[in-house]
Image: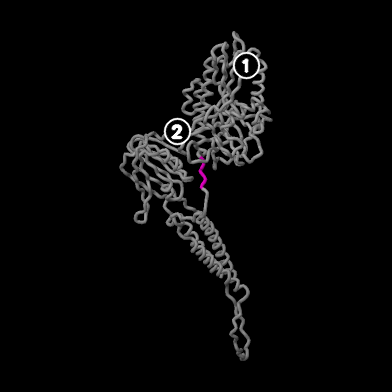
Amino acid sequence: MRLLAAIGLFFLSLGMLFVGVAERTIWSPPPSHNLSVQFDSTNPYVVIPSATLSGFSGNPTVHVSGRSKAFVASGREGDILAWVGEAPHTEITTISKKGSSELAPNSIFGSGNLANPKGSDLWRDSVSSNLSATLEVANNDGAAVIIASDGLSAAPNNISINWPIVHDLTQSNFLLIAGGVVLVAAFIMNVWAIGHHKRRRGPRRKVPRAPQGPKTRRRTSQIIVPSKGRRAARKVRYGVAVALSLAALSGCSQPSSTPTPTPSATGDTVQLAPPALVSSQIDRILADVADVALLADQHHQKLLLESRFSGPAFDMRAAHYFLQSKSKSVGDAMTIASKPLTFSLPAATSDWPRSVMLVTDPAGETLPQMLVLQQDTPRSQYMVNFVVGLMPGAKIPAVPVSTIGSIPSSADSVYLRLPPMDIPVTYGDVIDNGAASLSSAAYDVTHDAFYKDVSAGQQAQIDKLSKGKIKFKHSLGSSQIIALSTTSGGALVAVYMKDYYTITPVKAGSAVSVSGLEKLMLGTGGSTRGIRSVYGDMLLFYVPALSDNERIRLLGVTQGLLDVKGL
């Protein structure tokens, strides 16, 4: 019986090893799915939608070639279609023909403007080369592909898509290991059976039996009693071994390379807009912003800022360059660095304009800074509108994670403690009048160092002037107000406030004098008719929800002199 057990284990191991090897060889699926198409078209763009890229599972690799330059980029399908707009393009779809899938071009006519898609902030990843290009696409979040040459001439017309097939070898590895273990067990059982046979073999003398009388034959019973003892245990053991062998062989079938559809959720679902930017886009945009700022700071040329700066950030940096051109004693502007990135909050929207708030902690700066960028149209770049230095001890409230994004708030939102567009006037009134202001209850100025410094400075000017009078005015400096919601229903609000200081003499023949940066900006030491100075304040506030009892808090500010003129 030991020999039979060894033989059974041997054949069982052979079966397991055969199936394990077969899954790696003759039963293994092909290495990839390949679809290709070649067509004649003069369209400058080719779009591969998300449905085509999702024809098979896995991350596809797109290879294109043509007669000139080749550019391939991946992005959200809605972003790609928004960038293409009404321009003529070719859409690559998938059709079923004779039980297999094929790529089919569909030409879409249009009359939209043409442009080069290279370098757009909408692309998650891109590659360009001469004649041919290859790009692996992360097939998630509605990814699609745009193909072009230079945006003006015909796009590459030879396209192939490759989906790698991931073959799971877990079962094969188990069968090979288990088959090896069973084979060793069969060898051990065989050795044991041979040794046992050797110990029991040899001649044996039979003792003659004594004569016996006739026996009475007893009547046999038809009741079958189940066997007990070692023989029964052996039968059970062999039966289990055979059953395990059959289960292993029957469970090891050839894996299918065709993806199995999974049931989708039904019922009412809320479709949330995805974040406007992913981490790879943010890193690339920040790196370009830092390079542009560094080059402009080195040459003190505002024209070098135009590719990445606009609005308040551009105006204040341009004014600083002007002051630097007047005197070498004027220090450098606030350094803008791309790393380390400590905070990222993109808007969750599919519309334009789009915005993002980023906090970096550049070396050499005492406090972190927040960059607030906005993209006005699909074909424009993200422009830096605000560069705000965070206040000491400022705590940014809880916000959604960057992979979800924040819902934008409107400038006139009535769901916040104050509409963001009203903040410059009301906050300026608090600076001028303190607790006597009608808006003082809306702001928490207990730890607001900027409020204390500005209000104290204004009062000092009032006390200092004996032959003149001064007027203060605070107003909304730009319609570009960017507000992103927090998790508590409030909003982070970036707003631009302009401070106007008008000093006029009270007596004829007297003059108003200026010094420092105001003197550099004016170009002279004073004026007999009076002087108007304009300062810009890029402010970052936390504005709680209307239902919240919390007050509005200033989180950061960057102030700079914009203009000084004689009256």
Query: Quick one: 288 or 142, which is closer to the camera?
Result: 142
Question: In terms of sequence position, does the residue under pointer 2 or pointer 1 come before the other?
Answer: 2
169 vs 288: above or below: below
- Please give the label number shown on residue 328: none
Query: Quick one: 420 or 325, which is closer to the camera?
Result: 420
From the image, tell me which residue sits under label 2: 380
- Please give the label number shown on residue 469: 1
335 vs 524: above or below: below
Query: Quick one: 307 or 522, which is closer to the camera?
Result: 522
- Which region shows up in magenta? 271-275
The kind of residue tagged 2 is Ser
Residue 463 in magenta stretch: no
Tell me residue 471's x, y (percent): 61, 20
Q: Quadrant of the C terminus?
A: top right
Magenta-highlighted stretch: main secondary structure?
loop
In the picture, measured across the screen, residue 439 lies left or right of residue 305, that is right
Q: Residue at x 48, y 34 (%)?
A: 375
For disc 2, the neighbor class at 10 Å (few under 14, some 14 to 19, many from 20) is some
For disc 1, the neighbor class at 10 Å (few under 14, some 14 to 19, many from 20) is some
428 vs 512: above or below: below
Tell me residue 508's x, y (percent): 60, 9
